Image (tube, rainbow, N blue to C red):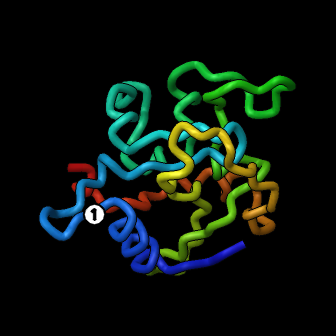
């Protein structure tokens, strides 16, 4: 498991998805679900705002949670699933340490080779610390800053 600061995580995202000629478009940032390997962008979640999706949902929840995906623990899993990084089974490889010290498990950024390849190895490492279920649910803290979704 890798722990990085929020600032380092934002810098990594900007390096992957930003350009020198225009400001960062957070809606274009893409993440890979560690269970079903579905790739979704922050912008893909906008249509599910009425179901509770936020800009940070892309980095912590497979889009199947909003689009009616199958259970992340189903046999014969198809994309997308309903996995959440803050759930009981932690499979994330990266944890973002927020300025206040809160640790938030996040999906990996999608790399160009991840998009449409289906060749990415699923992660099977526990990213959760020993916390109660109530504390895990609090992991839904905003990873992207309010207003970053533009």
Q: Can residue 59 be seen from the camera position used here?
A: no
Q: In the image, residue 32 lies at what x, y percent?
A: 57, 47
Which residue is disc 1 drawn over?
18
Vertical position of residue 66 compared to residue 60: above or below? above
Q: In the image, residue 33 lies at what x, y percent?
A: 62, 44
Q: Residue at x 27, y 63 (%)?
A: 18
Q: Can residue 118 be seen from the camera position used here?
A: yes
Q: Is residue 91 left or right of residue 109?
A: right
Q: Residue at x 65, y 32 (%)?
A: 82
Vertical position of residue 114 compared to residue 18: above or below? above
Quadrant of the rendered image containing residue 13: bottom left
Q: Is residue 37 left or right of residue 133?
A: left
Out of 118 and 68, give the one closest to the viewer: 118
Q: Is residue 18 left or right of residue 84?
A: left
Q: Quadrant of the N terminus?
A: bottom right
Q: Residue at x 41, y 43 (%)?
A: 41
Q: Is residue 98 left or right of residue 137?
A: left
């Amino acid at each position: 498991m890798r722990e990085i600061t929020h600032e380092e995580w934002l810098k990594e995202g900007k390096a992957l998805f930003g350009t020198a000629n225009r400001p960062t478009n957070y809606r274009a940032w893409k993440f890979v679900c560690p269970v079903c390997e579905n790739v979704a962008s922050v912008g893909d979640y906008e249509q599910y705002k009425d179901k509770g999706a936020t800009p940070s949902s892309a980095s912590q929840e497979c889009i199947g949670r909003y689009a009616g995906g199958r259970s992340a623990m189903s046999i014969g899993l198809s994309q997308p699933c309903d996995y959440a990084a803050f759930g009981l089974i932690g499979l994330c490889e990266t944890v973002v340490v927020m300025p206040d010290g809160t640790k938030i498990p996040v999906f990996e950024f999608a790399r160009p080779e991840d998009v449409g390849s289906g060749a990415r190895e699923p992660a099977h490492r526990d990213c959760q610390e020993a916390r109660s279920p109530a504390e895990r649910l609090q992991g839904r803290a905003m990873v992207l800053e309010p207003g970053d979704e533009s």
